[in-house]
Image (cartoon, grey):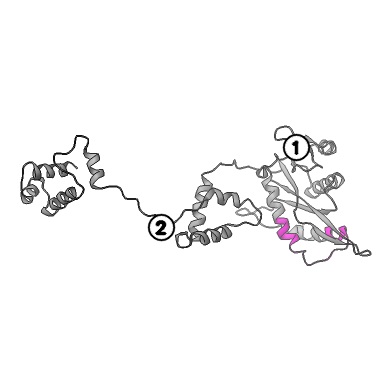
Amino acid sequence: MKKIIEILRLKYEAQLSHDKIARACQLSKGAVYKYVHLAKAKGITWPLADDVDEAALEALLFPAQEKPQRYVPPDCFQIHQELKRKGVTLQLLWAEYVARYETRAYRYSRFCALYRQWRDKQKRSMRQLHKAGEKAFIDYCGPTVEVINRHSGEIRHAQVFVGVLGASSYTFAEATWTQSLPDWIGSHQRMLRFFGGVPELLVPDNLKAAVTQACRYAPKINTTYTELATHYGTAVLPARPYKPKDKAKAEVAVQVVERWILARLRHRTFFSLAELNAAIAELLPQLNQRPFQGRRESR
């Protein structure tokens, strides 16, 4: 800007030619010509106004031009909220985004990358470290299994109980008719027998058979469930309400049981609960004999 001011001074105050101005300012004649005509086109005269300093002169000569935005960035917060709905995927949200913005929409890979960058900057979660024998996480599968009464043809839906050890992901599963207290307690007894030991903590969800009054800080444990924990020398630490990450191991185990066991039994017809549990027991060893990633010992 100092050189441009000097060019204008030499041009209008000293009345020098472009050739002499170029030699005085160590510029080409073309550069001098360009700046003189640019100032004339912008209506800048000599002497400069009192309120025109170097910054103001630069703004007058070279106004900032906003680049037209070619792509429309996705609304990452809205994407995050929509993904909480059952069945909604990034692929579906991207398709809706493309339908809305067409040629101004990002490709799928960039769309996912922008969302993940935004998500990674949000609230952090503490990673849980599981010690061997410390915790057993307990939950029920969402899908039920049909059991047909051989004589009446009545169809009943069996619940699938899942228990998993935190460090090894060693998994137990069985079917019961309900999630009521007697079935809940019986499943725990069979789970501990299957594990061949008792963990230090039992981490259930907040179903009524386990927790009579859910609370983030002081949940009220079912009396019978407390007596079971006392009998086995363990303790109950239920997950906080609406905090699925507290029992992420159970969530994953439920998903694995649904994929490894229930999906394989989908074409079979069962006529009794005992028959269903026998089929589950046959598949459990395959589930638990999966090798660790990067480790040699068994679960």
- Estimate the spatial distance between the alpha carbons at disc 2 and disc 1, rounded to whole Å: 51 Å
Q: Nearer the viewer, residue 12 or 157?
A: 12
Q: Nearer the viewer, residue 19 or 163?
A: 19
Q: Residue furthest top?
A: 218
Give the label on residue 70, or none.
Answer: 2
Give the label on residue 214, or none.
Answer: 1
Residue 90, image x, y percentages: 57, 57
Tell me if residue 255 is in the magenta stretch. Answer: no
Type of the residue with mark 1: Ala
User: Of circles 2 and 1, which is in front?
Assistant: 2
Side (left or right) of 112 relative to 149: left
Report the magenta residues as a range. 256-277
Side (left or right) of 288 relative to 80: right
Side (left or right) of 159 relative to 27: right
Which image quadrant: the N terminus?
Answer: top left
Give the secondary structure at mark 1. loop
Q: Is residue 167 visible?
A: no
Residue 61, image x, y percentages: 23, 47
Q: Earlier in the sequence, mark 2 or mark 1?
A: 2
